Image: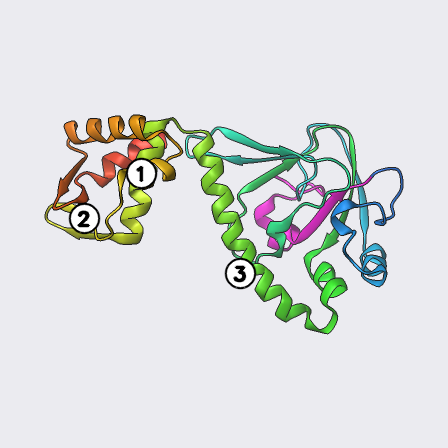
């Protein structure tokens, strides 16, 4: 993906450091719903560093504009939302450099967007404490992105793949590897697995029984054992 200057994204990580919003009839930030809580002087500071760009339908742009999507493990793009004027996008720009960019934004209709660099955005809101506030926002936003990515990928998976993904995540967080495979040190109930996999208890239990028959998992002393983690990973990616 290229930025709006035509440069490939890998040539400039700094190019991602933007927060953007589609504008309505004028270039003022007064009418943006997302900024109504800001003080007048904060909005004025943002307006001074606002850069306005025009985008045609289907063009890829730097930050969230109107169509926000994410790639699932199988390559399918999941549309997260169609965002109207008055909203603000590009929250991932507030995460410290080095974090992978997982969202793709494109103009769904012809659109005029205003951009503000992440540094200017933080300075307008926090002034001399911009660096400290930025570190906190970066930490919180990174966790938020992780949860959004997990949800988006689940939307592109069938139930078998979602159950496999939930088991894999449990193994990474609570698994102990030995000769039997990856033993979950935490007792995870079937109810909890159903909730994690966004499926009914009956259907998730049927998937778990099938996994046992196929030799992918087992149960020992009330704990789940992932006998073939690689096969579960392939199943999660294939959906």
Picture quadrant of residue 125: bottom right
Instruction: Verify whether residue 5 appears in magenta.
Output: yes
Q: Tell whether position 2 is magenta.
A: yes
Kindly report the distance in space between the C-alpha atoms of the residues bearing marks 1 and 3. 31 Å
Image coordinates of residue 195 in percent, x first then y, are 37, 38
Q: Which dot, 2 or 1, sits closer to the camera?
A: 1
Residue 111 appears in the picture as rendered: yes
* Span of residues in magenta: 1-23
Q: Residue at x 19, y 47 (%)?
A: 182
Secondary structure under badge 3? helix
**Side of 113 relative to 185 (left or right):** right
Lower position in the chain sequence, tag 2 or tag 1: 2
Number of the front mark, 1 or 3 = 1
For the residue labelled by badge 2, is the local secondary structure a helix, a strand or a loop? strand
Where, by quadrant of the figure, is residue 38 drawn?
A: bottom right
Report the Cα–Cα distance between label 2 and label 1. 19 Å
Q: Are dots 2 and 1 in contact, CB under 8 Å? A: no
**How many numbered marks appear?**
3
Please state which of residues 106 and 194 is positioned toward the viewer in this rendering. Answer: 194
Q: Earlier in the sequence, mark 2 or mark 3?
A: 3
Q: Quadrant of residue 111?
A: top right
The image shows residue 138, relative to residue 192, as above or below, that is below
Q: Position of residue 27 (x, y in %)?
A: 87, 45
Q: Which mark is residue 139?
A: 3
Q: Which residue is tagged 2? A: 183
Q: For numbered disc 1, what is the local secondary structure? A: helix
Q: Name the residue at 59% across, 50% down.
A: 92
* Observer-nearest of 214 and 101: 214
- The residue identified by callout 1 is 191
Q: Where does residue 126 sit, x and y in percent of width and height?
A: 72, 67
């Amino acid at each position: 993906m290229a930025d709006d200057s035509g440069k490939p994204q890998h040539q400039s990580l700094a190019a991602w450091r933007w927060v953007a919003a589609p504008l309505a009839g004028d270039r003022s930030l007064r009418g943006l719903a997302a900024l109504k809580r800001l003080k007048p002087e904060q909005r004025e500071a943002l307006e001074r560093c606002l850069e306005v760009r025009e985008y045609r339908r289907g063009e890829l742009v730097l930050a969230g504009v109107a169509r926000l999507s994410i790639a699932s493990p199988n390559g399918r793009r999941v549309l997260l939302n169609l965002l109207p004027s008055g909203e603000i996008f590009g929250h991932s720009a507030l995460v410290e450099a080095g974090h992978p960019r997982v969202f793709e934004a494109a103009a769904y209709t012809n659109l005029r967007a205003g951009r503000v660099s992440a540094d200017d955005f933080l300075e307008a809101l926090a002034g001399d404490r911009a660096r400290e506030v930025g570190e906190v926002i970066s930490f919180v936003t990174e966790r938020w992105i992780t949860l959004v990515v997990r949800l988006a990928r689940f939307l592109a998976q069938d139930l078998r793949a979602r159950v496999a993904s939930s088991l894999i995540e449990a193994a990474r967080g609570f698994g102990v590897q030995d000769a039997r495979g990856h033993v979950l040190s935490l007792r995870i109930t079937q109810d909890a697995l159903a909730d994690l996999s966004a499926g009914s208890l009956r259907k998730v239990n049927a998937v778990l029984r099938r996994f046992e028959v196929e030799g992918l998992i087992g149960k020992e002393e009330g704990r789940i054992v992932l006998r073939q983690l690689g096969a579960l990973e392939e199943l999660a990616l294939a959906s």
